[in-house]
Image (cartoon, helix red, strand yellow):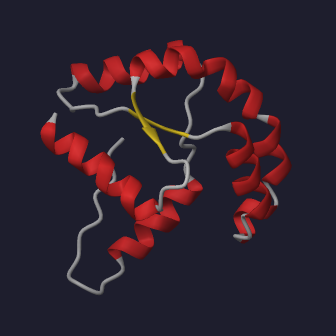
Amino acid sequence: MIIWLNGTFGAGKTTTAKEVTSLLPQTVLVEPYWQEIHDGLTKAGIPVHHFLLHTDRDTLVGRIETDTKPESVGARQWRLDHLTDYERALPWLRRAAQVVDTTGVAPAEVAETVLRKVRTG
């Protein structure tokens, strides 16, 4: 699925995009599910740039436990409970995606890294 938000400067595209992405499932940890999604998009001629944003478990736990956004607080334990599932999926995720280490990196820098990799192929 592609969601394209259009509008002039100041209309709320960036703010809305942040809100939309916070409401959508963003993780696929089951390899056959990912393969089905990837194959479907590829068959439809939609380029796929798959990135794995990764950091160590301690950093993940710290980020989850200190996330104060209202939608995150209620999901805190669920997120913590699924770290083991993520770790189990790491071998295939590392094969299928370009890994971007987010440890100690500001979100804006992570975004720039992703965009740079997309632009350079």
Above-or-below relation of 54 to 71: above
Q: Which quadrant holds the C terminus?
A: top left
As drawn, which residue projects farthest toward the left? 120
Specify the quadrant of the image occupied by residue 89.
Answer: top right
Q: Nearer the viewer, residue 56 or 7?
A: 56
In which quadrant will I find the N terminus? top left
Residue 12's place in the image compared with 17, above or below, is below
Place of residue 52 in the rendered image (x, y in percent of width and height, measured from the top left): 46, 34
Using the image, determine if residue 77 lies above or below residue 54.
Answer: below
Residue 63 percent location from the top left of the image: 70, 56
Name the one closer to the observer, 41 or 99.
Answer: 99
Q: Residue at x 43, y 75 (%)?
A: 15
Residue at position x 76%, y 27% from top? 84
Against 28, residue 12 (above or below) is below
The extreme bottom residue here reads: 10
Q: Quadrant of residue 27?
A: top right
Quarter of the view holding residue 87: top right
**Seen in the image, is 65 located left or right of residue 28?**
right
Percent of width and height locating residue 50: 36, 32
The number of discs equals 0
Q: Nearer the viewer, residue 83 or 106?
A: 106
Where is residue 35? Give x, y as percent: 43, 16
Q: Is residue 117 left or right of residue 38?
A: left
**Which residue appears at 80% of the width and 42% of the height?**
80
The residue lying at 76 percent from left, 34 percent from top is 82
**Image check: 47 left or right of 57?**
left
Q: Is residue 110 left or right of residue 92?
A: left
